[in-house]
Amino acid sequence: MRYKLLPPAVLAAIIAAGITAAADTSSWNDDDIMPLLDSLEIMQGDGMGDYGLDRFVSRAEMAKIAVNSSSHKDETAIGISVSPFSDVAGSSWAAPYILNGSQNGLFKGYMDGSFHPDDTVSFEEAVTMLLRCLGYDDDSFGVSYPYGQVNFAKNIDLLDNVSCSYGEMMTRRNIARMVYNALDTDMKDGSKKLISIFDATFGEDAVIIATPNEDNTVIGYKDGSMKEINLKDSTSCYKETTSYSYSNVRNEMEMGDVLKIKYKSDGDVDYVIYESGNMEGPVQVLSSDTLNRFAADASTAVMRDGNKV
């Protein structure tokens, strides 16, 4: 394979630029959303790529989804046998999530002390749970349930691409779309978002130091070592949270840009996040004062023939 390699001696002062993402949910589809929610452990499939998107969601399942979408995610005490509701056994898989969510005000039970965990969650119930994840309470809406909640959700784009309405039961497809919208919606106090795509667990990240060749191989650099990143034209590549195929963005990639790489269990690349960065160079070292001219110091990475020197 032939690469667009750096000159024999190169100064690589690598600075990854931060990116503020702005979601464009209209460009996403279910194939994009589900791997992300799976990575964040919010909604998971069967491990074979089947997410059961047309299946209805129970209140117990929605409890777990709401908790894992919230800032209280890490407070779930898995393994305890405690439940605040008469019809949820302490030994149930859902009990820790229902306990967490009820204690943190994400959802409530019924007047008789029950939760109805096996009932299908309704549109208005799911809307209310996710609004509570965003820090809102019943006093935030000003109109009786559920009209105030639903109208408010529309105003903050929580219902974009959601094909459901009052009284209808929620499928995993519609829940996933609503959750994705919630993840990129400001909290009530405007201080932060719940979770972003950048919170997904990635295998690694690397700064591009050799742009893609004809085999779709990118050369990345991290911590003094080089790595080949093998991509396909069809590999999902997220840029500012919008999904593209790798073939659509490869010509934009430049040395100094950053790739965050999410791998599948078999070691193949699942998807990448592409962030613009900046890098001084490549610079061919021709004299002893080259490093001084670029304000380099002992921590500056110098690469020669693909190796840190």
Image (spheres, rainbow, N blue to C red):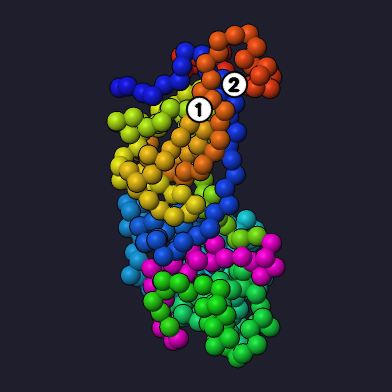
Residue 181, position as x, y percentages in the image: 50, 66
Residue 138, position as x, y percentages in the image: 65, 82
Task: Specify whether residue 33 is painted magenta.
Answer: no
Report crowding for label 1: few under 14, some 14 to 19, many 20 or more residues within 10 A (C-alpha): many
Left or right of 93? Residue 18 is right
Left or right of 210? Residue 192 is right
Q: Secondary structure at mark 2?
A: strand
Magenta residue span: 166-191
Q: Secondary structure at mark 1?
A: strand
| Front in this rendered view, residue 187 or 264 | 187
Among the 4 quarters of the image, the one containing residue 186 = bottom right
- Marks 1 and 2 in Cβ contact (< 8 Å): yes
Q: Amino acid at mark 1?
A: Tyr
Residue shown at 57% from the left, 48% from the top: 19
Residue shown at 56% from the left, 31% from the top: 279
Q: Amino acid at mark 2?
A: Ala
Quarter of the image that includes the C terminus:
top right
**One can see residue 1 in this view:** yes
Name the residue tied to disc 1.
Answer: 221
Task: Kindly identify which numbered label has been placed on residue 76.
Answer: none
| Front in this rendered view, residue 193 or 95 | 193
From this view, report whether residue 196 is shown above or below residue 270.
Answer: below
From this view, report whether residue 146 is shown above or below residue 240.
Answer: below
For this orientation, the residue located farthest to the bottom is 144
Name the residue tied to disc 2.
Answer: 301
Which mark sits nearer the N-terminus, 1 or 2? 1
Quarter of the image that includes the N terminus:
top left
